[in-house]
Image: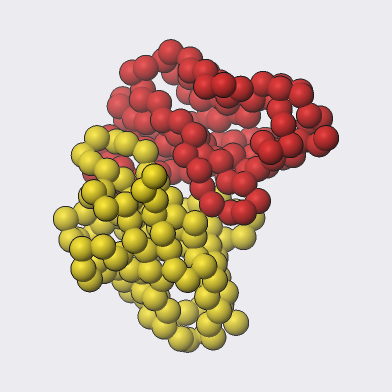
Amino acid sequence: AQKVTQAQTEISVVEKEDVTLDCVYETRDTTYYLFWYKQPPSGELVFLIRRNSFDEQNEISGRYSWNFQKSTSSFNFTITASQVVDSAVYFCALSEVVDSSYKLIFGSGTRLLVRP
Amino acid sequence: EPEVTQTPSHQVTQMGQEVILRCVPISNHLYFYWYRQILGQKVEFLVSFYNNEISEKSEIFDDQFSVERPDGSNFTLKIRSTKLEDSAMYFCASRAGTQVGEQYFGPGTRLTVT
């Protein structure tokens, strides 16, 4: 069964600290996609990244980086030199190719609070 | 930049009333979704819609729910007889094509059932 686990409910850091948000997934499919979305206090869901199961290269985008490891079924997200504007809830999500609707299965989210 | 829009932003209704939540997906997108998020909880899939029909629905999406694409632009979610537990944020999302691309979400409609 497909499942996404974000064990960290809430993380609090001081501005400029690095922080890693963990995501562990379960899937029956060999081809799947992983996503991260950001939900700021205003409530919308903002797409951050999509990664397919065949591409294990880590990705960096500015202060954001993602570490995908199939061997441990993890897709962790690191924010370097965190800023107050990074305060939000971050959701990891999974979509399976075998699933014709390609629906997103979300984790429970990690609330990140960056203090000045 | 094209975006998904949703109206209204907040809807308050009494238990037992019908509500219609409206969405305008991104214009060249083919797949449409509704998700809901009960306050403080995770985002849950409700239904997906492709080629003018439901492609998948979750256990939450019972007979009280329906979706429609009445014209070329709108995508609606109807709740026939609202219950207190339907209070949540409802997100519409759309996706471009047959590849598993990212879904773009609207800003959400907060539904409060009293």
Query: x%, y% of residue B21?
Result: 41, 71
Left or right: residue A15 compared with residue B75: right
Chain A hue?
red
Q: Can you give x and y, in whole percent of width and height, for residue A80 in the image?
A: 67, 21
- Residue B66, image x, y percentages: 31, 71
Considering every residue shown, the one lying at the far front of the view is: B1
At x 39%, y 54%, the residue is: B4
Res. A116 visible in picture:
yes
Vertical placement of residue B77 versus A66, above or below:
below
Asked if A34 appears above or below A63 in the picture, the reply is: below
Residue B45 position within the rendered picture, expressed as x and y whole percent measured from the top left:
41, 53
Chain B shade in the render: yellow
Compared across the picture, whether A75 is left or right of B18 comes to right
Q: Residue at x 76, y 24 (%)?
A: A16
The front one of B94 and B63 is: B94
Q: Residue furthest top?
A: A57
Number of numbered callouts drawn: 0
Between A46 and B58, the one lying in front of the other is: A46
What colour scheme has been applied to the protein in the rendered image? by chain
Question: From the image, which quarter does the C terminus of chain A lie in?
Answer: top right
Residue depicted at 76% across the width and 23% down the height: A17
Above or below, comparing residue A63 to residue A43 in the picture? above
Determine if residue A4 is in view. no
Q: For the point 59% across and 39% down, which residue is it?
A: A90
Quarter of the figure with the N terminus of chain A: top left
| Image side of residue A9 versus residue A74, left or right | right
